[in-house]
Image (cartoon, grey):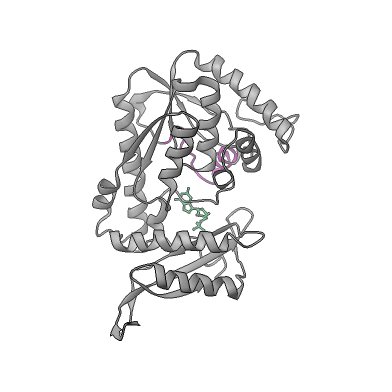
Amino acid sequence: MDPNVRPETMERITTPELAQAFIDEQIAAVRKQVGDKKVLLALSGGVDSSVVAALLIKAIGDQLICVHVNHGLLRKGEPEQVIKVFKEELGANLIYVDVTDRFLDKLAGVEDPETKRKIIGKEFIDVFAEEASKLEGIEFLAQGTIYPDILESRDGIKAHHNVGGMPEEFNFELVEPVKLLYKDEVRVVGKALGLPDNMVYRQPFPGPGLGVRCVGAITRDRLEAVREADAIVREEIGKMDPTPWQYFVAIPDVKSTGIKDGKRYMGWAAVIRAVDTKDAVTAKSVEIPWSILRTIRDRIIAEVPGVNRVLWDYSDKPVSTIEWE
Ligand code: XMP
């Protein structure tokens, strides 16, 4: 039996009971695979790696070493939540590295979207590899691979980096406890493991983070404006029922004229985007009620330094990709 093929007899995990049965089964499987050896995990705070971390903490306790890399492009409150939930509440063996300066220095003046992505991806692997090389006796690498990753890489839709792009010299054996699960099942398992709702039902967030929403060459002040405006939009659009599939803010590197306290006030335009989609291949702009748009506008203008205009990007994909870069 191919371990990367979901058996037809496997029941879809839709209830806490099915989730618990899966958790018990995986705890036993991981203990058998790993024995008394150590396992390393890059914990981003996204749904998949968070669920794997919570599962492995149950299975092997402090034989799991989590590394949370803060590249400075995370959303407001995210690194703090990872530390609170995993270190303080679940007692994880968590290494936190703040490499914001290193990333922003490398990205300074870089305008091209693909070059930005490449720099962010490469630096991330370098930082993770550096942290791994400081540790002794690691034999396993845990990953939040899920079933669509396996299907998409098999169909050639996207290359799934099975070892997270880790340099070959590390030679880790993989631990991938949720690799046969679909996203909705991962969330049910996450709930059963006791993870908070805002982690389990988190919207998709690109690996390069706010870097692709701070459009053009990233500067610290505009990046902070993206982070603050994004937090406001997540809070306000989060009140819609149902919430859109993905909603966020981008701020392009353009200033326009404004007026504040009787003086000229050159500022950026914060662009709101909210979309619904099944698979992110195509997407429809979501209608946001005027009352919410108005609150967002007033809050961003009042609370986010450097922004003097709020726009709504209501384009569909195609032709407009979900992210601006
Ligand atoms: P686009 O912009 O291509 O985005 O319409 C489709 C979905 O993918 C997310 N996205 C990424 N996710 N790494 C990721 O893990 C990336 O580099 C990346 N770029 C886009 C995007 O947020 C949307 O949900």
Residue 157 left/right relative to 67: right
Q: Is residue 119 magenta?
A: no
Q: Is residue 155 magenta?
A: yes
Residue 176 left/right relative to 225: right
* Residue 119 point in image, percent of width and height: 31, 48
Residue 7 in which image quadrant: top right
Residue 140 in which image quadrant: top left
Res 44 seen here: no
**Residue at position x 61%, y 72% in the image:** 289
> Where is the N terminus found, in terms of image quarters?
top right
Q: Which residues are magenta?
A: 149-164
| Secondary structure predominantly adopted by residues drawn in magenta | loop
**Residue at position x 31%, y 37% in the image:** 127
Query: Camera-side residue: 33 or 291?
Result: 291
| Placement of 246 over or under 7, stated as above or below | below
> Where is the C terminus found, in terms of image quarters?
bottom left
| Placement of 154 over or under 218, stated as above or below | above
Res 138 seen here: yes
Kindly give the residue lying farthest to the bottom in the view shown: 262
* Residue 232 point in image, percent of width and height: 48, 62
Query: Camera-side residue: 273 or 79?
Result: 79
* Residue 56 point in image, percent of width and height: 52, 26
Q: What count of labels does the image hold?
A: 0
**Residue at position x 47%, y 74% in the image:** 298
Residue 298 left/right relative to 189: left
| Placement of 172 over or under 277, stated as above or below | above
* Residue 221 point in image, percent of width and height: 30, 62
